[in-house]
Amino acid sequence: MTTKLSQEEVLAIINNDEKTAYGILYDADPKLATRFGRVDRLIVKLLKDVKKHFPDATYYTGSGGFNLLLGESHNDKDEPQSELIACSGLASIGGGDW
């Protein structure tokens, strides 16, 4: 597949029971899901390595950013602890709960 599909077009394909989102992605480029898996494994490994030095380290994606914190994003009073940001990435990762 070499065409670009909007969100609406993707949803129409899915809602017509033609394919899943994974199937659409795979048709566009079979390597994309593999690359996503590789990036995911690297992110998991990085946090594991950071936790050897900082056991409370975590990732935080508030407001679409991507950050590595050396502790929790908020304290017990639900106050932000942005001073714990050690690294910020360029990736934009939306938050939310389904």
Image (cartoon, rainbow, N blue to C red):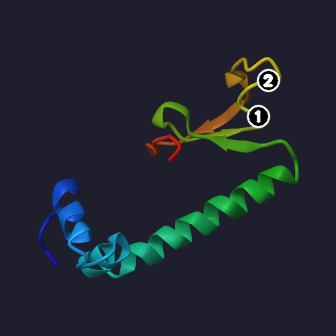
The residue tagged 2 is: 75
The residue tagged 1 is: 72
Identify which residue is drawn at 71% across, 31% down.
Answer: 73
Q: Which mark is residue 32?
A: none
Q: Dividing the picture into quarters, in which one does residue 76 lie?
A: top right
Identify whether 77 is placed above or below 64: above
Q: Amino acid at mark 2?
A: Asn
Q: How many marks?
A: 2
Determine the CA span between mark 1 and mark 2.
7 Å
Identify which residue is drawn at 72% across, 23% down.
Answer: 81
Locate residue 94 relative to residue 7 in the image: left or right: right
Pick the residue in front: 53 or 8. Answer: 8
Per the image, label 1 sits on a secondary structure element best described as: loop
Locate residue 65 relative to residue 27 in the image: left or right: right
Pick the residue in front: 37 or 11. Answer: 11
Q: Are marks 1 and 2 in contact (CB under 8 Å)?
A: yes
Residue 32, given in percent of the width and then of the height, sits at 38, 73
Residue 92, given in percent of the width and then of the height, sits at 43, 43
Locate residue 58 relative to residue 91 in the image: left or right: right
